Image (spheres, rainbow, N blue to C red):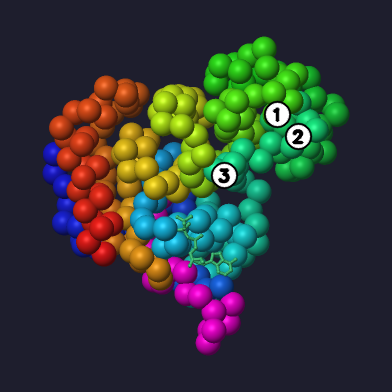
Amino acid sequence: MEVSEPNAPPPKAGANFVQIEDVSLRYGDSSSGTLAIEGATLSIADGEFIAVVGPSGCGKSSLLKLVSGLHPPAEGVVRVGGKMVDRPIDICGIAFQNSTLLPWRTTLENVLLPLEIVQPYASNFRKNKAEYEARARELLAAVSLAGFEDRYPWELSGGMQQRASLCRALIHKPKLLLLDEPFGALDAFTREDLWTILQDLCIRERPTVILVTHELREAVFLADTVYVVSPRPGKILRREEVPYARPRTYEMTFESDFVDLVHSLRESIQRN
Ligand SMILES: Nc1ncnc2c1ncn2[C@@H]1O[C@H](COP(=O)(O)OP(=O)(O)OP(=O)(O)O)[C@@H](O)[C@H]1O
């Protein structure tokens, strides 16, 4: 497999769904604040799945804050769907390391939550409740949670909670799915099961995805393109296209090309 030079610059942004153009992000003021990201440029095609990897504290989660509009750039421009992001956007679904399901709501009620909040669904929630519930049940069935709709989060295992949380992130058919270490708190077996489940969900729903992860095998298994970020302030050091067709299988992770790519990414991170 062709592996690009570790320090090759990222390609120029094109007409894509997400465009991050020469963006820097700073927490606090310019004298005493923290420069988390510096001069990042990348673009993500509609329906593309990218993974962002790099050392702890390099600005991976900050990149998600930029794209979702939760934090403004200090410099540069972020565009999603051609529009400049200058406030929190509602066309994204988000899942974090901890499932953040609400303990007083059942699994089904948790999955339905975005439809009660995000427009245009919220205004029609009562009228369309049966239809929304059918979609929630269908998504839960797709992640093998049929029969658990009426259970509370504390009655589910960590892996089940995370599967429910993926359904919640996708219930409103977001164009953009932001995943911040969604499987980081899970054991290795559960985590690897969830790779396949997430892959199947993405094949079915076709969102554009940004996955932040420390797990390089996870990045290569799931992504079309992997971006390596330098230590803080985070800069894009490397862009690597993953050449495998989908659906990818767990067995592929043992093939020499796959293992070589993972090692090469690890080297890029360790070298910087
Ligand atoms: N709200 C904040 N206020 C001030 N500094 C922050 C804030 N959030 C993050 N930082 C700092 O910005 C830098 C980048 O943080 P970020 O969470 O984006 O890194 P990360 O790559 O996601 O880290 P990890 O892999 O450990 O989760 C870190 O030095 C962090 O301490």
Q: How many angstroms separate mark 3 from mark 1 (CA)?
A: 17 Å
- Residue 164 in the image: x percent, y percent? 62, 28
View extreme (bottom): residue: 31
| Residue labelled with disc 2 | 103
| Residue labelled with disc 3 | 96
Mark 3 / mark 1, whichever is N-terminal: 3
Q: How many marks?
A: 3
Q: Say what secondary structure mark 1 lies in.
A: helix
Mark 2 crowdedness (10 Å alpha carbons): few <14, some 14-19, many ≥20: few
View extreme (right): residue: 126
Q: What residue is at 44 percent from the left and 62 percent from the top?
A: 57
Residue segment shown in magenta: 28-44
- The amino acid type of the residue labelled 1 equals Trp
The quadrant of the rendering that contains the N terminus is top left
Q: What residue is at 16 percent from the left and 56 percent from the top?
A: 5
Q: Nearer the viewer, residue 186 or 131?
A: 186
Residue 160 found in image quarter: top right
| Residue labelled with disc 1 | 154
Q: What residue is at 20 percent from the left and 57 percent from the top?
A: 6
Does the segment drawn in magenta span residue 78? no
Placement of 42 over or under 258, stated as above or below:
below
